[in-house]
Image (cartoon, grey):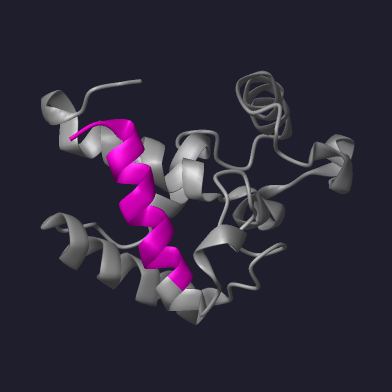
Amino acid sequence: MNQAEIEKRVRGVVAGALDHPLEKVLPDASLVDDLGAESIDFLDISFRLESEFGIEIPEDEVWKGSFEGVGDDPAAIAERVERLKAERPGFPWERYPLASLGPRDLPRLITVRTIVDYLAGRLGDGVETA
């Protein structure tokens, strides 16, 4: 399985869970801001991902995404946001007050791509990168 196949499957899961047409579920769409996900939706998506990929996802692990290990440290969050900005130029960064971005804001940065990256790491050697 390659990353494009993972992305296609993740987009289908997210579209189904959030009741959106597939064409609206883009790789850089914020699950919260663009697709209207709420906390209960994250549980539903997680369960659906487990079924789709035949893996168990520890509670909240997939949602840590690109911020795993930064904790509440504002400098660590800012550093990680800067790296994400370089990696994901298609994400609408202008929406977010990056200077004051805190741990409560991080779920707003979760995208389909965040989930794909997590799953690619979890599925390991069987994943081919594009």
Residue 129 falls in image quadrant: top left
Query: What is the x, y in percent for residue 109?
Result: 64, 48
Instruction: Tell me the quarter of the image containing the C terminus.
Output: top left
> Observer-nearest residue: 4 or 100?
4
Question: On the picture, is 102 further left or further right than 18?
Answer: right
| Quadrant for the N terminus in the image | top left
Residue 116, quarter of picture: top left
Position of 74 with respect to 20 (left or right) is: right
Percent from the top left, x then y, of residue 4? 35, 36
- Give the percent coordinates (x, y) of residue 125: 13, 24
Q: Is residue 54 shown in magenta?
A: no
3 with respect to 18 (left or right): left
Say left or right for 75 vs 17: right
Query: Image height check: is 36 above or below 85?
Result: below
Residue 124, position as x, y percentages in the image: 17, 29
Residue in the picture at 37% in, 76% down: 44
Q: At 71% across and 22% down in the image, what residue appears?
A: 82
Q: Depth check: give the residue in front, 101 or 56.
A: 56
Which range is magenta? 1-15
Please identify the dominant SS of the magenta region.
Answer: helix
Tell me where residue 83 sits by quadrant: top right
Task: Tell me, yes or no, if residue 61 can be seen here.
Answer: no
